[in-house]
Image (tube, rainbow, N blue to C red):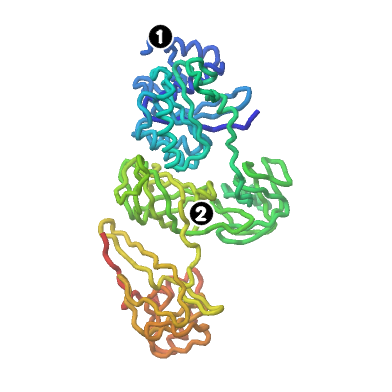
Amino acid sequence: MNGLLKFITCGSVDDGKSTLIGHILYDSKLLYADQEKALVLDSKVGSRGGEIDYSLLLDGLMAEREQGITIDVAYRYFTTDRRSFIVADTPGHEEYTRNMAVGASFAQLAIILVDATQGVLVQTRRHSRICSLMGIRHFVFAVNKMDLADYKEEHFLTIKKVISDLTKELSLENVAVIPVSATKGDHVTKKSPNMPWYQGEPLLSYLEEVDVTEKEENSEFYMPIQRVCRPNHDFRGFQGQVESGEVWVGKKLMALPGKETACVKSLLMGNQSVDRARAGQAITIRLDREVDVSRGCILADKELPISKEVKASLLWMDEEPLQCGNEYLLKLGTKMVPAVIKEVEYQIDVNTGSHMREYTVMKNEIASCSLILSQSIVVDEFKKNKTLGELILIDRVSHMTSACGVIEKVEGTSEKPYFQKEGLKTGGSLFEELYVNLDQDFMFRKKSPKKTYRQGDLIPLEGDSFHYPDYFDVISSTDHAVVLIRNRTVYDIIPLNAYEFGGLPVLDKRGFTLNIHTREDLKAYLHDTLQENQEKTLEVQNKWAKFEPYRKIVFSS
Protein backbone atom coordinates (compact mmCIF):
# COMPACT_ATOMS: atom_id res chain seq x y z
CA MET A 1 0.00 0.00 0.00
CA ASN A 2 1.22 3.53 -0.80
CA GLY A 3 1.58 6.11 1.97
CA LEU A 4 -1.12 8.45 3.28
CA LEU A 5 -2.25 11.13 0.80
CA LYS A 6 -3.66 14.40 2.13
CA PHE A 7 -5.43 16.36 -0.59
CA ILE A 8 -7.79 19.26 -1.05
CA THR A 9 -10.63 19.87 -3.50
CA CYS A 10 -11.22 23.44 -4.62
CA GLY A 11 -12.63 25.48 -7.47
CA SER A 12 -15.41 27.94 -8.14
CA VAL A 13 -18.94 27.77 -6.71
CA ASP A 14 -20.96 24.74 -7.82
CA ASP A 15 -18.10 23.19 -9.78
CA GLY A 16 -18.97 19.84 -8.17
CA LYS A 17 -16.25 19.41 -5.55
CA SER A 18 -18.46 17.76 -2.92
CA THR A 19 -20.21 15.67 -5.58
CA LEU A 20 -16.87 14.38 -6.89
CA ILE A 21 -15.63 13.17 -3.49
CA GLY A 22 -19.06 11.81 -2.60
CA HIS A 23 -19.05 9.76 -5.82
CA ILE A 24 -15.61 8.35 -4.97
CA LEU A 25 -16.87 7.23 -1.55
CA TYR A 26 -20.06 5.75 -3.02
CA ASP A 27 -18.46 3.90 -5.97
CA SER A 28 -15.62 2.57 -3.81
CA LYS A 29 -18.12 1.03 -1.36
CA LEU A 30 -16.68 3.15 1.44
CA LEU A 31 -20.05 3.85 3.10
CA TYR A 32 -21.82 2.08 5.91
CA ALA A 33 -25.17 0.56 4.95
CA ASP A 34 -27.13 3.14 6.97
CA GLN A 35 -25.18 5.98 5.33
CA GLU A 36 -26.04 4.68 1.87
CA LYS A 37 -29.74 4.34 2.73
CA ALA A 38 -29.82 7.84 4.24
CA LEU A 39 -28.11 9.24 1.13
CA VAL A 40 -30.70 7.71 -1.19
CA LEU A 41 -33.55 8.95 1.02
CA ASP A 42 -32.17 12.48 1.30
CA SER A 43 -31.66 12.64 -2.48
CA LYS A 44 -35.29 11.68 -3.15
CA VAL A 45 -36.57 14.62 -1.10
CA GLY A 46 -33.95 16.98 -2.55
CA SER A 47 -33.88 18.94 -5.77
CA ARG A 48 -32.33 16.48 -8.22
CA GLY A 49 -35.39 14.63 -9.42
CA GLY A 50 -34.71 11.58 -7.28
CA GLU A 51 -31.15 11.02 -8.58
CA ILE A 52 -28.51 10.37 -5.94
CA ASP A 53 -26.99 13.64 -4.71
CA TYR A 54 -23.45 12.58 -3.80
CA SER A 55 -22.55 16.02 -2.39
CA LEU A 56 -24.77 15.30 0.63
CA LEU A 57 -22.07 12.94 1.92
CA LEU A 58 -19.83 15.94 2.56
CA ASP A 59 -22.11 18.93 3.04
CA GLY A 60 -22.99 18.29 6.67
CA LEU A 61 -24.19 21.75 7.67
CA MET A 62 -27.89 22.50 7.25
CA ALA A 63 -27.12 25.99 5.89
CA GLU A 64 -24.92 24.45 3.22
CA ARG A 65 -27.57 21.95 2.15
CA GLU A 66 -30.21 24.66 1.89
CA GLN A 67 -27.98 26.83 -0.33
CA GLY A 68 -26.50 23.95 -2.30
CA ILE A 69 -22.95 25.17 -1.59
CA THR A 70 -20.15 24.28 0.79
CA ILE A 71 -19.30 26.89 3.46
CA ASP A 72 -17.07 25.15 5.98
CA VAL A 73 -14.09 22.89 5.30
CA ALA A 74 -15.29 19.27 5.46
CA TYR A 75 -12.61 16.66 6.22
CA ARG A 76 -13.15 13.01 5.29
CA TYR A 77 -10.98 9.98 5.92
CA PHE A 78 -11.17 6.90 3.69
CA THR A 79 -9.05 3.95 2.60
CA THR A 80 -8.92 1.87 -0.57
CA ASP A 81 -6.98 -1.32 -1.14
CA ARG A 82 -4.02 0.70 -2.36
CA ARG A 83 -3.92 3.85 -0.22
CA SER A 84 -5.31 5.84 2.73
CA PHE A 85 -6.63 9.35 2.18
CA ILE A 86 -7.59 12.50 4.05
CA VAL A 87 -9.55 14.95 1.90
CA ALA A 88 -10.51 18.54 2.68
CA ASP A 89 -13.57 19.68 0.71
CA THR A 90 -13.41 23.48 0.70
CA PRO A 91 -15.83 26.28 -0.20
CA GLY A 92 -15.73 27.77 -3.68
CA HIS A 93 -17.30 31.17 -3.06
CA GLU A 94 -14.86 34.10 -2.96
CA GLU A 95 -16.32 35.13 0.43
CA TYR A 96 -14.89 31.93 1.93
CA THR A 97 -11.43 32.03 0.34
CA ARG A 98 -9.84 32.09 3.80
CA ASN A 99 -11.61 28.80 4.63
CA MET A 100 -10.14 27.31 1.48
CA ALA A 101 -6.65 28.51 2.48
CA VAL A 102 -6.99 26.65 5.79
CA GLY A 103 -7.63 23.42 3.91
CA ALA A 104 -4.71 24.07 1.55
CA SER A 105 -2.27 24.53 4.43
CA PHE A 106 -2.37 20.82 5.29
CA ALA A 107 -2.52 19.27 1.81
CA GLN A 108 0.10 17.56 -0.34
CA LEU A 109 -2.04 17.62 -3.50
CA ALA A 110 -4.80 19.86 -4.83
CA ILE A 111 -7.71 18.78 -7.02
CA ILE A 112 -8.94 21.93 -8.72
CA LEU A 113 -12.28 21.50 -10.45
CA VAL A 114 -13.01 23.37 -13.66
CA ASP A 115 -16.57 23.53 -14.98
CA ALA A 116 -16.41 22.28 -18.59
CA THR A 117 -19.27 24.62 -19.53
CA GLN A 118 -17.52 27.73 -18.15
CA GLY A 119 -13.80 27.05 -18.39
CA VAL A 120 -11.08 28.56 -16.18
CA LEU A 121 -12.57 31.34 -14.01
CA VAL A 122 -11.02 34.01 -11.78
CA GLN A 123 -11.74 31.89 -8.71
CA THR A 124 -9.97 28.93 -10.36
CA ARG A 125 -6.88 31.10 -10.77
CA ARG A 126 -7.20 32.42 -7.21
CA HIS A 127 -7.35 28.93 -5.72
CA SER A 128 -4.45 27.73 -7.88
CA ARG A 129 -2.33 30.66 -6.74
CA ILE A 130 -3.20 30.16 -3.07
CA CYS A 131 -2.45 26.43 -3.24
CA SER A 132 0.93 27.24 -4.78
CA LEU A 133 1.51 29.91 -2.11
CA MET A 134 0.78 27.32 0.59
CA GLY A 135 3.46 25.02 -0.77
CA ILE A 136 1.37 22.44 -2.64
CA ARG A 137 3.50 20.86 -5.38
CA HIS A 138 1.06 18.38 -6.96
CA PHE A 139 -2.05 19.46 -8.88
CA VAL A 140 -4.92 17.68 -10.61
CA PHE A 141 -7.20 19.83 -12.74
CA ALA A 142 -10.45 17.86 -13.00
CA VAL A 143 -12.47 19.21 -15.92
CA ASN A 144 -15.93 18.40 -14.57
CA LYS A 145 -19.42 18.27 -16.11
CA MET A 146 -18.14 16.77 -19.34
CA ASP A 147 -21.64 15.25 -19.74
CA LEU A 148 -23.00 18.80 -20.17
CA ALA A 149 -20.34 19.42 -22.84
CA ASP A 150 -21.45 16.30 -24.75
CA TYR A 151 -18.12 14.61 -23.88
CA LYS A 152 -16.45 16.47 -26.76
CA GLU A 153 -12.65 16.13 -26.94
CA GLU A 154 -12.15 19.53 -28.60
CA HIS A 155 -13.96 21.20 -25.71
CA PHE A 156 -11.63 19.48 -23.24
CA LEU A 157 -8.50 20.37 -25.25
CA THR A 158 -9.48 24.06 -25.35
CA ILE A 159 -9.72 24.16 -21.56
CA LYS A 160 -6.52 22.10 -21.22
CA LYS A 161 -4.63 24.73 -23.25
CA VAL A 162 -5.75 27.49 -20.82
CA ILE A 163 -4.71 25.30 -17.86
CA SER A 164 -1.32 24.75 -19.50
CA ASP A 165 -0.81 28.53 -19.74
CA LEU A 166 -1.85 28.91 -16.08
CA THR A 167 0.60 26.17 -15.10
CA LYS A 168 3.47 28.07 -16.71
CA GLU A 169 2.37 31.38 -15.22
CA LEU A 170 2.34 29.99 -11.66
CA SER A 171 5.31 27.61 -12.20
CA LEU A 172 3.17 24.72 -10.98
CA GLU A 173 4.81 21.31 -10.68
CA ASN A 174 3.46 17.79 -11.31
CA VAL A 175 0.22 18.74 -13.06
CA ALA A 176 -2.39 16.28 -14.42
CA VAL A 177 -5.56 17.24 -16.34
CA ILE A 178 -8.40 14.69 -16.24
CA PRO A 179 -11.89 14.98 -17.85
CA VAL A 180 -14.66 13.78 -15.49
CA SER A 181 -18.35 13.90 -14.75
CA ALA A 182 -18.83 13.85 -10.99
CA THR A 183 -22.58 13.34 -11.28
CA LYS A 184 -22.48 10.52 -13.85
CA GLY A 185 -19.24 8.96 -12.57
CA ASP A 186 -17.22 9.25 -15.81
CA HIS A 187 -13.48 8.80 -15.14
CA VAL A 188 -14.03 9.18 -11.38
CA THR A 189 -13.27 5.66 -10.18
CA LYS A 190 -13.21 3.81 -13.51
CA LYS A 191 -12.72 4.53 -17.19
CA SER A 192 -15.71 5.88 -19.10
CA PRO A 193 -16.96 4.57 -22.47
CA ASN A 194 -18.29 8.09 -23.12
CA MET A 195 -14.75 9.49 -23.56
CA PRO A 196 -12.74 6.86 -25.48
CA TRP A 197 -10.42 9.61 -26.73
CA TYR A 198 -8.95 10.03 -23.22
CA GLN A 199 -6.23 7.41 -22.71
CA GLY A 200 -5.20 8.39 -19.17
CA GLU A 201 -6.21 6.73 -15.93
CA PRO A 202 -9.34 7.70 -13.94
CA LEU A 203 -9.03 10.13 -11.05
CA LEU A 204 -9.04 7.64 -8.16
CA SER A 205 -6.40 5.44 -9.82
CA TYR A 206 -4.19 8.51 -10.29
CA LEU A 207 -4.60 9.47 -6.62
CA GLU A 208 -3.75 5.93 -5.51
CA GLU A 209 -0.47 5.93 -7.43
CA VAL A 210 0.82 9.52 -7.39
CA ASP A 211 4.12 9.95 -5.52
CA VAL A 212 3.99 13.05 -3.34
CA THR A 213 7.20 12.31 -1.45
CA GLU A 214 9.21 15.49 -1.00
CA LYS A 215 12.81 15.25 -2.10
CA GLU A 216 14.88 15.92 0.99
CA GLU A 217 17.18 18.71 -0.14
CA ASN A 218 17.90 19.57 3.46
CA SER A 219 18.89 16.55 5.55
CA GLU A 220 20.21 18.50 8.52
CA PHE A 221 18.40 17.90 11.81
CA TYR A 222 16.19 20.46 13.48
CA MET A 223 13.23 20.34 15.85
CA PRO A 224 11.06 23.26 17.09
CA ILE A 225 10.47 23.00 20.85
CA GLN A 226 6.79 22.52 21.58
CA ARG A 227 7.10 21.98 25.33
CA VAL A 228 9.71 21.79 28.08
CA CYS A 229 8.90 18.76 30.24
CA ARG A 230 9.83 19.02 33.95
CA PRO A 231 8.01 16.23 35.89
CA ASN A 232 10.62 16.49 38.67
CA HIS A 233 13.86 18.28 39.47
CA ASP A 234 15.95 15.46 37.96
CA PHE A 235 14.33 15.45 34.54
CA ARG A 236 14.34 18.19 31.90
CA GLY A 237 13.24 17.16 28.42
CA PHE A 238 12.51 19.11 25.26
CA GLN A 239 9.49 17.85 23.35
CA GLY A 240 8.52 18.38 19.72
CA GLN A 241 8.32 16.82 16.28
CA VAL A 242 11.46 16.25 14.23
CA GLU A 243 11.02 18.33 11.09
CA SER A 244 14.16 17.32 9.23
CA GLY A 245 17.05 14.86 9.40
CA GLU A 246 17.88 12.44 12.19
CA VAL A 247 19.02 12.67 15.80
CA TRP A 248 20.69 10.06 17.99
CA VAL A 249 22.11 9.68 21.47
CA GLY A 250 25.47 11.44 21.63
CA LYS A 251 24.75 13.83 18.75
CA LYS A 252 25.92 17.42 19.31
CA LEU A 253 23.08 19.97 18.98
CA MET A 254 22.82 23.75 19.02
CA ALA A 255 19.99 25.58 20.82
CA LEU A 256 18.77 28.50 18.70
CA PRO A 257 18.62 31.45 18.80
CA GLY A 258 20.98 31.40 21.81
CA LYS A 259 23.58 29.22 19.99
CA GLU A 260 24.50 27.19 23.10
CA THR A 261 25.64 23.65 22.34
CA ALA A 262 25.14 20.33 24.16
CA CYS A 263 25.02 16.62 23.38
CA VAL A 264 21.96 14.36 23.41
CA LYS A 265 21.91 12.42 26.68
CA SER A 266 18.80 10.33 25.91
CA LEU A 267 15.80 10.12 23.59
CA LEU A 268 12.23 9.16 24.46
CA MET A 269 9.39 8.28 22.12
CA GLY A 270 6.34 8.29 24.34
CA ASN A 271 7.64 6.55 27.48
CA GLN A 272 10.06 4.31 25.56
CA SER A 273 13.78 5.02 25.30
CA VAL A 274 15.16 4.94 21.74
CA ASP A 275 18.63 5.34 20.27
CA ARG A 276 17.64 7.56 17.32
CA ALA A 277 14.68 9.36 15.72
CA ARG A 278 13.95 10.80 12.28
CA ALA A 279 11.74 13.39 10.56
CA GLY A 280 8.04 13.11 11.37
CA GLN A 281 8.46 11.48 14.78
CA ALA A 282 7.41 13.14 18.05
CA ILE A 283 10.15 12.79 20.67
CA THR A 284 11.57 14.06 23.95
CA ILE A 285 15.25 15.06 23.95
CA ARG A 286 17.36 15.23 27.11
CA LEU A 287 20.69 17.06 26.90
CA ASP A 288 23.87 16.43 28.86
CA ARG A 289 23.98 19.95 30.28
CA GLU A 290 21.68 22.87 31.07
CA VAL A 291 20.98 25.22 28.16
CA ASP A 292 18.64 28.19 27.85
CA VAL A 293 15.77 26.64 25.86
CA SER A 294 12.03 27.33 26.00
CA ARG A 295 8.95 26.84 23.81
CA GLY A 296 9.58 28.33 20.37
CA CYS A 297 13.33 27.69 20.38
CA ILE A 298 14.94 25.30 17.90
CA LEU A 299 17.31 22.38 18.47
CA ALA A 300 19.47 21.85 15.38
CA ASP A 301 22.80 20.41 14.32
CA LYS A 302 23.88 23.63 12.57
CA GLU A 303 23.13 27.35 12.60
CA LEU A 304 19.89 28.50 10.95
CA PRO A 305 18.94 32.07 9.90
CA ILE A 306 18.03 34.33 12.82
CA SER A 307 16.36 37.66 12.12
CA LYS A 308 13.70 40.14 13.20
CA GLU A 309 12.93 41.52 9.74
CA VAL A 310 11.30 39.51 6.94
CA LYS A 311 9.47 39.96 3.66
CA ALA A 312 6.37 37.78 3.29
CA SER A 313 3.54 37.09 0.86
CA LEU A 314 0.28 37.40 2.83
CA LEU A 315 -3.27 36.29 2.10
CA TRP A 316 -5.34 38.84 4.02
CA MET A 317 -8.24 37.19 5.89
CA ASP A 318 -9.53 39.96 8.14
CA GLU A 319 -12.77 41.86 7.56
CA GLU A 320 -10.83 45.04 8.31
CA PRO A 321 -8.30 46.11 5.64
CA LEU A 322 -4.60 45.72 6.30
CA GLN A 323 -3.12 48.69 8.14
CA CYS A 324 0.62 49.38 8.03
CA GLY A 325 1.91 50.11 11.51
CA ASN A 326 -0.62 47.86 13.25
CA GLU A 327 0.81 45.27 15.62
CA TYR A 328 -0.19 41.60 15.40
CA LEU A 329 0.91 38.35 16.97
CA LEU A 330 3.03 36.41 14.50
CA LYS A 331 2.98 32.62 14.91
CA LEU A 332 5.73 30.70 13.13
CA GLY A 333 6.23 27.07 14.06
CA THR A 334 5.96 26.92 17.84
CA LYS A 335 7.07 30.54 18.30
CA MET A 336 4.71 33.47 18.82
CA VAL A 337 6.00 37.07 18.91
CA PRO A 338 4.53 40.56 18.40
CA ALA A 339 5.11 41.89 14.87
CA VAL A 340 4.38 45.08 12.95
CA ILE A 341 3.56 45.30 9.24
CA LYS A 342 6.11 47.88 8.16
CA GLU A 343 4.91 48.43 4.60
CA VAL A 344 3.00 46.92 1.69
CA GLU A 345 5.48 46.62 -1.16
CA TYR A 346 2.90 45.60 -3.75
CA GLN A 347 -0.36 43.72 -4.19
CA ILE A 348 -0.53 40.64 -6.42
CA ASP A 349 -3.25 40.55 -9.09
CA VAL A 350 -4.89 37.18 -8.53
CA ASN A 351 -5.93 36.93 -12.19
CA THR A 352 -2.64 37.80 -13.92
CA GLY A 353 -0.04 37.55 -11.17
CA SER A 354 1.20 41.07 -11.95
CA HIS A 355 2.44 43.36 -9.18
CA MET A 356 0.18 46.33 -8.52
CA ARG A 357 1.18 49.51 -6.72
CA GLU A 358 -1.91 49.21 -4.55
CA TYR A 359 -1.28 49.62 -0.84
CA THR A 360 -4.82 49.05 0.46
CA VAL A 361 -5.26 45.29 0.99
CA MET A 362 -8.75 43.94 1.57
CA LYS A 363 -10.04 40.52 2.61
CA ASN A 364 -8.99 37.63 0.29
CA GLU A 365 -6.34 39.75 -1.46
CA ILE A 366 -2.66 38.80 -1.65
CA ALA A 367 0.19 41.22 -1.01
CA SER A 368 3.94 41.28 -0.48
CA CYS A 369 4.74 42.98 2.84
CA SER A 370 7.71 43.82 5.05
CA LEU A 371 7.36 42.86 8.73
CA ILE A 372 9.37 43.80 11.80
CA LEU A 373 9.34 41.38 14.76
CA SER A 374 9.76 42.38 18.39
CA GLN A 375 12.73 40.04 18.73
CA SER A 376 15.04 37.96 16.57
CA ILE A 377 13.74 34.44 15.93
CA VAL A 378 14.78 31.43 13.87
CA VAL A 379 13.16 31.93 10.46
CA ASP A 380 13.87 30.82 6.89
CA GLU A 381 12.56 31.24 3.36
CA PHE A 382 9.53 29.03 2.68
CA LYS A 383 11.03 27.55 -0.49
CA LYS A 384 14.04 26.38 1.52
CA ASN A 385 12.34 25.34 4.73
CA LYS A 386 8.56 24.98 4.90
CA THR A 387 8.13 24.74 8.69
CA LEU A 388 10.29 27.80 9.40
CA GLY A 389 8.84 29.76 6.50
CA GLU A 390 5.05 29.63 7.01
CA LEU A 391 3.23 32.01 9.35
CA ILE A 392 -0.08 33.39 10.50
CA LEU A 393 -0.88 36.85 11.90
CA ILE A 394 -3.33 37.02 14.81
CA ASP A 395 -5.27 40.11 15.87
CA ARG A 396 -4.14 40.98 19.40
CA VAL A 397 -7.61 42.11 20.51
CA SER A 398 -10.05 39.70 18.86
CA HIS A 399 -7.56 36.79 18.55
CA MET A 400 -8.91 36.14 15.06
CA THR A 401 -6.51 35.06 12.31
CA SER A 402 -5.87 38.18 10.22
CA ALA A 403 -3.56 36.67 7.61
CA CYS A 404 -1.62 33.62 6.59
CA GLY A 405 1.47 33.64 4.45
CA VAL A 406 4.98 32.51 3.64
CA ILE A 407 8.42 34.03 4.10
CA GLU A 408 9.90 35.14 0.78
CA LYS A 409 13.08 36.77 2.11
CA VAL A 410 14.92 36.94 5.42
CA GLU A 411 16.71 40.23 5.95
CA GLY A 412 20.36 40.14 6.96
CA THR A 413 20.90 38.46 10.32
CA SER A 414 24.03 40.40 11.11
CA GLU A 415 25.22 43.93 10.48
CA LYS A 416 26.95 44.56 7.19
CA PRO A 417 30.45 45.95 7.84
CA TYR A 418 30.10 49.52 6.60
CA PHE A 419 33.72 50.17 7.49
CA GLN A 420 36.56 47.68 7.26
CA LYS A 421 40.35 47.67 7.39
CA GLU A 422 42.21 44.37 7.67
CA GLY A 423 40.99 42.70 10.90
CA LEU A 424 38.94 45.72 12.03
CA LYS A 425 35.34 46.17 10.95
CA THR A 426 32.25 47.92 12.26
CA GLY A 427 28.65 48.08 11.11
CA GLY A 428 25.71 50.20 12.09
CA SER A 429 22.85 52.25 10.72
CA LEU A 430 24.79 55.45 10.11
CA PHE A 431 23.29 55.94 6.64
CA GLU A 432 19.81 54.48 7.17
CA GLU A 433 16.90 56.84 6.59
CA LEU A 434 14.26 57.37 9.30
CA TYR A 435 10.67 58.23 8.39
CA VAL A 436 7.33 58.72 10.16
CA ASN A 437 4.15 57.77 8.30
CA LEU A 438 1.68 60.52 9.12
CA ASP A 439 -1.34 58.45 8.07
CA GLN A 440 -0.60 55.64 10.53
CA ASP A 441 1.62 57.42 13.12
CA PHE A 442 4.24 54.75 12.48
CA MET A 443 8.01 55.17 12.41
CA PHE A 444 10.03 53.06 10.00
CA ARG A 445 13.51 52.99 8.54
CA LYS A 446 14.83 52.46 5.04
CA LYS A 447 18.04 50.50 4.88
CA SER A 448 21.02 52.02 3.12
CA PRO A 449 22.68 50.22 0.20
CA LYS A 450 24.90 47.42 1.49
CA LYS A 451 28.35 48.80 0.86
CA THR A 452 31.61 48.42 2.72
CA TYR A 453 33.75 51.55 3.04
CA ARG A 454 37.51 51.25 3.30
CA GLN A 455 40.39 53.62 3.91
CA GLY A 456 40.35 56.42 1.33
CA ASP A 457 36.68 55.98 0.33
CA LEU A 458 34.37 58.99 0.04
CA ILE A 459 31.21 58.63 2.21
CA PRO A 460 27.70 60.15 1.83
CA LEU A 461 27.22 62.94 4.36
CA GLU A 462 23.69 63.99 3.42
CA GLY A 463 20.38 62.14 3.14
CA ASP A 464 16.72 62.74 3.87
CA SER A 465 17.25 62.16 7.59
CA PHE A 466 20.96 62.83 8.22
CA HIS A 467 23.48 65.59 7.61
CA TYR A 468 26.96 64.89 8.98
CA PRO A 469 29.93 67.29 9.20
CA ASP A 470 33.01 66.91 7.02
CA TYR A 471 35.16 65.94 10.02
CA PHE A 472 34.06 63.56 12.82
CA ASP A 473 34.84 60.26 14.57
CA VAL A 474 32.65 57.12 14.83
CA ILE A 475 33.12 54.97 17.94
CA SER A 476 31.93 51.37 18.20
CA SER A 477 32.66 49.98 21.65
CA THR A 478 31.09 46.61 20.72
CA ASP A 479 33.44 46.23 17.71
CA HIS A 480 36.38 47.88 19.55
CA ALA A 481 37.02 50.13 16.57
CA VAL A 482 37.00 53.84 15.68
CA VAL A 483 36.45 55.29 12.20
CA LEU A 484 38.17 58.62 11.51
CA ILE A 485 36.31 60.75 8.92
CA ARG A 486 38.36 63.59 7.49
CA ASN A 487 37.17 65.89 4.67
CA ARG A 488 34.24 63.52 3.82
CA THR A 489 36.67 60.60 3.46
CA VAL A 490 37.54 57.52 5.54
CA TYR A 491 40.94 58.67 6.76
CA ASP A 492 41.62 55.58 8.90
CA ILE A 493 40.07 52.78 10.98
CA ILE A 494 41.91 52.16 14.23
CA PRO A 495 41.56 49.97 17.35
CA LEU A 496 39.54 51.56 20.15
CA ASN A 497 42.45 51.35 22.59
CA ALA A 498 44.59 53.44 20.19
CA TYR A 499 42.07 56.28 19.90
CA GLU A 500 42.77 59.69 21.42
CA PHE A 501 40.08 62.35 21.57
CA GLY A 502 41.06 65.38 19.47
CA GLY A 503 38.06 67.67 19.88
CA LEU A 504 36.03 66.61 16.82
CA PRO A 505 32.35 65.58 17.06
CA VAL A 506 32.00 61.95 18.19
CA LEU A 507 29.14 59.76 16.92
CA ASP A 508 28.11 56.19 17.59
CA LYS A 509 27.52 53.73 14.73
CA ARG A 510 23.82 54.71 14.55
CA GLY A 511 24.71 58.30 13.79
CA PHE A 512 23.69 59.54 17.27
CA THR A 513 25.84 62.28 18.78
CA LEU A 514 27.76 61.27 21.91
CA ASN A 515 28.18 63.74 24.77
CA ILE A 516 31.97 63.54 24.62
CA HIS A 517 33.75 66.91 24.80
CA THR A 518 36.90 66.08 26.74
CA ARG A 519 39.29 63.18 27.23
CA GLU A 520 37.74 62.63 30.66
CA ASP A 521 34.30 62.30 28.99
CA LEU A 522 35.74 59.67 26.63
CA LYS A 523 37.22 57.72 29.52
CA ALA A 524 33.90 57.78 31.42
CA TYR A 525 31.92 56.80 28.32
CA LEU A 526 34.15 53.82 27.60
CA HIS A 527 33.95 52.74 31.24
CA ASP A 528 30.12 52.79 31.09
CA THR A 529 29.76 51.06 27.72
CA LEU A 530 32.37 48.38 28.25
CA GLN A 531 30.89 47.50 31.64
CA GLU A 532 27.22 47.64 30.59
CA ASN A 533 24.98 44.61 30.51
CA GLN A 534 21.60 44.13 28.89
CA GLU A 535 19.73 45.73 31.78
CA LYS A 536 21.93 48.85 31.71
CA THR A 537 22.04 49.38 27.93
CA LEU A 538 19.11 51.82 27.84
CA GLU A 539 20.44 53.69 30.86
CA VAL A 540 23.84 54.14 29.19
CA GLN A 541 22.31 55.22 25.87
CA ASN A 542 20.08 57.79 27.55
CA LYS A 543 23.04 59.18 29.44
CA TRP A 544 25.48 59.53 26.54
CA ALA A 545 23.64 59.58 23.18
CA LYS A 546 21.32 62.16 21.64
CA PHE A 547 19.51 62.22 18.31
CA GLU A 548 20.45 65.70 17.21
CA PRO A 549 22.14 67.65 15.70
CA TYR A 550 23.06 65.36 12.79
CA ARG A 551 19.94 63.20 12.69
CA LYS A 552 16.29 64.12 12.01
CA ILE A 553 13.00 62.36 11.24
CA VAL A 554 11.31 62.94 7.90
CA PHE A 555 7.50 62.82 7.66
CA SER A 556 6.03 60.67 4.94
CA SER A 557 2.53 59.70 3.77
Q: Where is residue 373? Give x, y as percent.
A: 43, 57
Number of marks in the rendered image: 2
Residue placed under numbered mark 1 in the picture: 50
Residue placed under numbered mark 2 in the picture: 379
| Residue at 51% over, 54% down | 379
Closer to the camera in the image, 539 or 112: 112
Does the image show residue 73?
Answer: no
Position of residue 5 in the picture relative to residue 454 (left or right) = right
Q: Residues within 10 Å of mark 1 (few under 14, many from 20)?
A: few
Q: Residues within 10 Å of mark 2 (few under 14, many from 20)?
A: many
Mark 1, mark 2: which one is toward the viewer? 1
Q: Secondary structure at mark 1?
A: loop
Position of residue 444 in the picture relative to residue 59 (left or right) = left
Does the image show residue 440?
Answer: yes
Q: Secondary structure at mark 2?
A: loop
For residue 165, which quarter of the picture? Answer: top left
- Where is the C terminus found, in terms of image quarters? bottom left
Q: Where is residue 334? Give x, y as percent.
A: 52, 48
Q: Is residue 488 above or below residue 287?
A: below
